[in-house]
Image (spheres, rainbow, N blue to C red):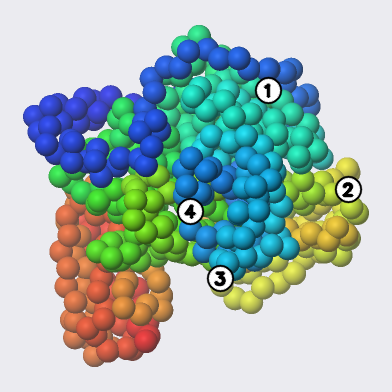
Amino acid sequence: MKKIILGIFVAMTTMFMTVAQNTDQYFEFMHAHHMLDSSELYVPHVASKAFTSTAPPTGVIRAIPEWDPAQAVLVSYAQSYSGFGIPYTLIAQESQYCKVITIVASAAQQTTVTSSYTSNGVNLANCSFVVAPIDSYWSRDYGPWFIMTNNNTIAVVDFPYNRPSRPNDDNVPVVMASNLIEPLYGMNVMHTGGNYMCDGMGVAAMTDLVIDENAGLTHAQIDTAFKQYMGITNNYIVTDPLGQYIKHIDCWGKFLDVDKILIASVPTNNAQYSAYEATATYWANQTSSYGNKYQVYRTYEPSGQPYSNSFILNKKVFVPIMGGSSTTYDNDALAVYQQAMPGYAVIGVLGLTGSNSWVSTDALHCRNHEIADKGMLYIKHLPLLGEKPMQTQYLISADVYALSQSALITDSAWVKYRVNHASWNTLAMTHGLNNNWTANIPQQLAGDTIEYYIHASDLSPRSQTHPLIGQYDPHKFWIATGTTVVEDKNAVTAMVFPNPAVNNLYVQMVNTQDATTHIRLFDMLGNEVKTLVETNLDNKLLNINLSDIPLGTYFLQIVSDNFSTNKKIMVMR
C-alpha cells in the first residue's frame, strides 16, 4: 500500500512565519473562511467514543466514488440550524431527476418540510422521508459511505464521526443502512465525509486530520483499515494547505474523475499561496489509477469562494457561486468545470440570502450526500491511454456487472471509436468468460489518434458507458510514429477553451514554471488585436476578454520559452 504524506512542510513553515509577521492578514483570511458553526473548526483530537465495529467485508471490495450512478441524494433538516443550509431551489432541481431522501427529527417536522417543498417546487413524487433524531445538516460529514462487495452488492460503511457533541448525527449511517436494506460494516477509524474522496478504483485521499483524530492508530493501521473495509489500496494522506483549519479535503480539492483533480488557487499575496501551489504540483506528479498523471484543474478563489465544494450527481455538477462582486470569478469557475467535465451539465447555485449564504469552504457539497444506486450497471475497464506501438489490433476488454441481477442485453455491449476526430464506428463486443466482454479496434496508421468509449445496457433497464460521460470525453490513445516516443510528463502544454468562444477565452498552461508567456490574437488579415505578456502562468487560469472584438475567426499564438502553439479560435455571439 502506498502511504503518502504530502511534503510541503517547508512551504507551510514559511506560511506560518509570514502569518506571524502579519497577524492582521492572517485573521482577515480566517474571517473570510469562517464557518457558520464554530464547532466545525479544526479539532486536533477527540477522545475515544463508543462505536460498534464489525468484521470487514470479504471478497472484492470497491469504494464507490461520488460520480457513480446515484439512486437518491440525502439531505437533513436540522431545526436548530433553521433548516437545510442549502436553498430550496437546489433541492427542487435535484428532485426533478433523482429521488431526495430527507432526514427529519419528527412527524411534525416532516409536515413542515413537505409544505415548504410544495411551496418551492420540489417534486414530491421523488421525495421520501426518514424520521430519526438529527443534530445538524452536514449530511456529507456524517452520512454513510458506500462500497460494492464482490461486484454484486452495495453495502454501507459506518465510522465514528469526529464530532462527539452530535451523537444523533453519528448514528445516521446505521439508520440509512436499515432504511436502504443494505449490509452494514463498522470501521473503527474516526473520520468525516468532508475529508474523504475516492476514485472507484482503489485510490482515496484525505488530509492528515485522520491521523490527528486517531491518536491510538498508526498511519499503517489506518491504511490497513481502509484496505479491509473500503478496498483502498492507495491511500493519499496529505497536508492541508489551509493549515490548522477544518482540515477537510473538500475545502480546497476534489476528484472530478479517475485521473482529474480540482485544486483551488489563491492570490500570490495570500499567506497560503505557496502551500496551494505545492499541493497542485504534488498532484500533477502523482499517477492515477489509469496509469497516467493526474490532470490538475484550478479554480481561482481570491476571497475564499467555495468552488471546490461542489456536488456531482448523475452527470450534473452543482457548483456554489457567490454572485455580486464575485460574478466574474463565478463564471471563470464554471468554465473550468465545463472544460474539465465535458458532457456534464454544470449548474451554478447561489446560496441563501443573509447569514446562511455560502461562506467560503462551507457550501453545498457539505450538505448533500449521494446514495449509491444499489442496482447500478458497473463497467470495469482499464483504458488504453497515451502512446501505443503499432499493432494489428487493439484489445478493448471490460467486465460488466448488473447489480440489479437483470440480464445484460447482448447487442447493447459495444465499443464506439473514431480516428483523428472523424465519424464514429461501432464494434460489437463478444461475451467471454464470466462477465468479460471484448472487442478489437483494427490497426491504424502511425501518428493516428484513436478515441473510444464502451456501452452496455441491462433489462432493469439501465444503461452505462465507460468513461461515464461517453463520447463527450472518450478515452484517447495514439499510434507511435516509427521509433517509440515516451510521453514527456514535464512537457509544457496549453489548454484553450471554450471554442467557439463568446465573450471570454480561457488559457491554462502546465509546466511553464516561471517562464514569460506571450499571447497574441490575430484576425484573418494578420492584424494583432490582442497582446498579453504573463509571467508564471503554471496551473493558473488566464481569462482573455473578447467582448470588445467582432465575431469571426481568429488565430491565437502562445509562445513561452521553448514552447509555441497556434490555435484557430471562433468568436460567436
Which residue position holds label 2?
A: 405
Which residue position holds label 1?
A: 186
User: For the residues carrying marks 1 and 3, which lies nearer the camera in this image?
Assistant: 1
Say which label, 1 or 3, has the lower sequence index. Answer: 1
> Marks 1 and 4, Cα distance to the nearest angstrom?
29 Å
Say which label, 2 or 3, has the lower sequence index. Answer: 2
Determine the secondary structure under disc 2.
loop
Q: Quadrant of the N terminus?
A: top right
Labels 2 & 1 near each other (Cβ < 8 A): no
The residue type indicated by label 4 comes to Ile
Depth check, front residue: 173 or 327: 173
> Residue at the location (19% across, 77% down)?
530
> Marks 2 and 3, Cα distance to the nearest angstrom?
38 Å
User: For the residues carrying marks 2 and 1, which lies nearer the camera in this image?
Assistant: 1
Say which label, 2 or 4, has the lower sequence index. Answer: 4
Q: Which mark is residue 420?
A: 3
Labels 4 & 3 near each other (Cβ < 8 A): no
Residue lying at the far right of the rendered structure: 407
Labels 2 & 3 near each other (Cβ < 8 A): no
Depth check, front residue: 414 or 270: 270
Residue 477, by quadrant, is bottom right
Q: Which mark is residue 86?
A: 4
Say few, some or many: other residues with alpha carbon within 10 Å of mark 1 (under 14 / 14 to 19 / 20 or more): many
Determine the secondary structure under disc 4.
loop
Q: Is residue 216 visible?
A: yes
